[in-house]
Amino acid sequence: MGIEEKLPSGFMLTSVEHLAGYMRKSSLWPATFGLACCAIEMMTTGAPRYDLARFGMEVFRASPRQADLMIVAGRVSQKMAPVVRQVYDQMVEPKWVLSMGVCASSGGMFNNYAIVQGVDHIIPVDIYLPGCPPRPEMLINAILELHKQIQSMPLGVNRVAAVKAAEAAALAATPTSQMKGLLR
């Protein structure tokens, strides 16, 4: 990001981390990425009744290069999966992902060959938001939880290591279709 990348780990970063965390959480720019019915609830959250502008995210960006938060709202098909990954790769660092709805989180009721059984098989997810479809209040609560994560995120060398470890763990996870449980 800047000077914190050049300093040794832990050198004068405590107060800088708090300040940078506060500024990052107060200026999230979400990407426009609505895939199904959950997108209607996401659009409602940006409307005057719920007013996402209170949290510094009043404009959904059409370009991934201007966004740092991807809200995956709805089911992800196998054909859309490479596009989701490409948009994620084009986003600026640091970047966060919110999986909105049960279809984006686990495939939902669509347990077939055409739907990805969880967007976390494609990109690392920071917050999972359940529901079919989740209400705007639930999305606002998930965004506030993401604010807490962003506020306490480390900077510098520690951030790079944390991001790489989280992405490696997410991509190495067992696919939902191979998990054994009560329904299989």
Image: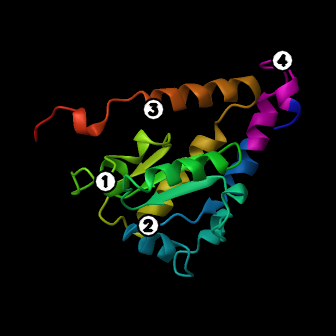
Horizontal side of 77 relative to 50 (left or right) equals left
Dividing the picture into quadrants, the one containing residue 180 is top left
Instruction: Work out whether 171 lies above or below 150.
Output: above
**Residue 42 location (% of width, % of height):** 48, 69
Q: CA distance from mark 4 to mark 1?
A: 45 Å
Q: CA distance from mark 1 to mark 2?
A: 27 Å
Q: Name the residue type under label 1.
A: Ile
Q: Which mark is residue 8?
A: 4
Which type of secondary structure does the marked residue at label 1 adopt?
A: loop
Q: Name the residue type under label 3.
A: Leu
Q: Name the residue type under label 4.
A: Pro
Q: Which residues are magenta?
A: 4-20
Q: Nearer the viewer, mark 2 or mark 4?
A: 4
**Residue 174 location (% of width, % of height):** 32, 30
Query: Residue placed at 47% from the left, 47% from the top?
Result: 127
Q: Which mark is residue 171?
A: 3
Which type of secondary structure does the marked residue at label 2 adopt?
A: helix
Q: Which mark is residue 137?
A: 2
